[in-house]
Amino acid sequence: AQSVTQLDSQVPVFEEAPVELRCNYSSSVSVYLFWYVQYPNQGLQLLLKYLSGSTLVKGINGFEAEFNKSQTSFHLRKPSVHISDTAEYFCAVSDRRDDKIIFGKGTRLHILP
Amino acid sequence: KAGVTQTPRYLIKTRGQQVTLSCSPISGHRSVSWYQQTPGQGLQFLFEYFSETQRNKGNFPGRFSGRQFSNSRSEMNVSTLELGDSALYLCASSLGTGNFDEQYFGPGTRLTVT
């Protein structure tokens, strides 16, 4: 069975500093990988996705993620965060064999002034 | 193009009651998925409807049900509410089934069960 682990429930970081949000998944087959962002009182918005091809994926708002098959990881990074990046971030995995998606528990990103 | 809309946005019910939540997808989208979001369990997939048929179902009891109409609007019903059903219920729409890379979420309905 698939599972997604987001190792940090909260990550504080100073404004303009770099950030990495960690995500590991378990699956024995090929997967699609996603990062979503949820701003306060809103639904989820897709940040980026890995379907195939290049392992470095660039998304919206300056975020990028790298798919590492050997480490079964899909960590999200941004070189310089802004106060507007304050949100909860969800990693998700979808098994290519079925039409289901599993989400991690989320990581709250706190931007410190 | 209008986004995914969910009504109502907030709801308070008491234990034992039932509730119906509504989701209107983006125009042209035929798939609607429902998710439950709680602080303890995170986001969990409830079910997906495509062309008025349930295509996928998560691990939730039979008290959770849904349906989709010919205009792709979807409703979710929870009967015999329990305190643990308090959550943010999100729906998402996409053109086709399983299109998680092209899934658009609504703002959610926050259900509080007292």
Image (spheres, coloured by chain):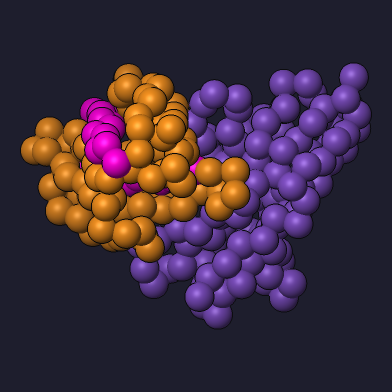
Viewer-proximal residue, B86 or A49? B86
Image quadrant in which you'd find residue A56? bottom right
**From what the image shows, is residue A28 above or below residue B3?**
below
Identified at 36% across, 58% down, the residue is B60
Viewer-proximal residue, A46 or A54? A46
Placement of the C terminus of chain A among the 4 image quadrants: top right
Residue B105, given in percent of the width and then of the height, sits at 42, 35
**From what the image shows, is residue A72 above or below residue B80?**
below
Q: Which chain is purple?
A: A
Viewer-proximal residue, B102 or B16? B16
How many numbered marks does the figure carry?
0
**From what the image shows, is residue B43 above or below residue B73?**
below
Residue B86, given in percent of the width and then of the height, sits at 45, 38
Identified at 53% across, 70% down, the residue is A2
Residue B114, given in percent of the width and then of the height, sits at 43, 33
The stretch drawn in magenta includes residue A19: no
Q: Which residues are magenta?
A: B16-37
Rendered colour, chain B = orange
Residue A77 shown left or right of residue B4 in the figure: right
Identified at 31% across, 53% down, the residue is B47
Viewer-proximal residue, A93 or A11? A11
Residue A1, given in percent of the width and then of the height, sits at 50, 75
